[in-house]
Image (tube, helix red, strand yellow):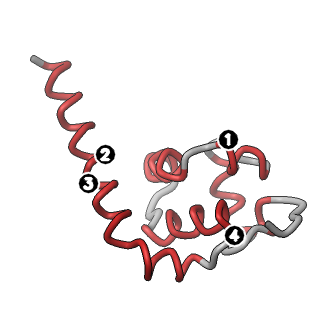
Amino acid sequence: MNIADNIADLQGLGPKSAAQLAQIGISTIEDIMKTDAYEIYARLKKHVPNTSLNMLYAIMGAQENIHWLSIAKNRKMEILMRLDDIAHKEINRKKTRTA
């Protein structure tokens, strides 16, 4: 990976993305690298209105030093299936709590 000083220097992320990530406590390169991309995306969806799927692609791209469009093109189906699985687990967990 290229040496970067801050999140905005990572592949596919910039100042706007860095500011959004800071809102959920992701403020260093170490934070973004050690946190699961899906977890980051879920937290963003809760706290930052209109977070798009492109942000998940960008987070994954930054973690892997790959352009986000490459992630979107080559792994879109895998990512959508994982998001669907996560959503189903959340629904089942909520059902279990109310039962």
User: Which mark is in front, 3 or 1?
Assistant: 3
> In the rendered view, does 52 fall on the left or right side of 88?
right
Q: Position of residue 62 (x, y in %)?
A: 67, 65
Q: Secondary structure at mark 1?
A: loop
> In the rendered view, does 25 fall on the left or right side of 29?
left
Q: Amino acid at mark 1?
A: Gly
Q: Residues within 10 Å of mark 1 (few under 14, many from 20)?
A: few
Q: Residue at x 65, y 64 (%)?
A: 64
Q: Give the vertical position of 59 relative to 94 (above or below).
A: below
Name the residue carrying label 1: 25
Q: Amino acid at mark 3?
A: Asp
Name the residue carrying label 4: 65
Mark seen at residue 86: 2
Q: Residue at x 68, y 50 (%)?
A: 32
Mark 3 → mark 1, Cα distance in angstroms: 25 Å
Q: Position of residue 34 (x, y in %)?
A: 67, 43
- Sequence order check, earlier mark of 1 and 4: 1
Q: Depth check: give the residue in front, 78 or 24.
A: 78
User: Marks 3 and 2: in contact by CB < 8 Å?
Assistant: yes
Q: Position of residue 88 (x, y in %)?
A: 21, 44
Mark 2 → mark 3, Cα distance in angstroms: 5 Å
Q: Secondary structure at mark 2?
A: helix
Quarter of the figure with the C terminus: top left
Q: Residue at x 31, y 70 (%)?
A: 77
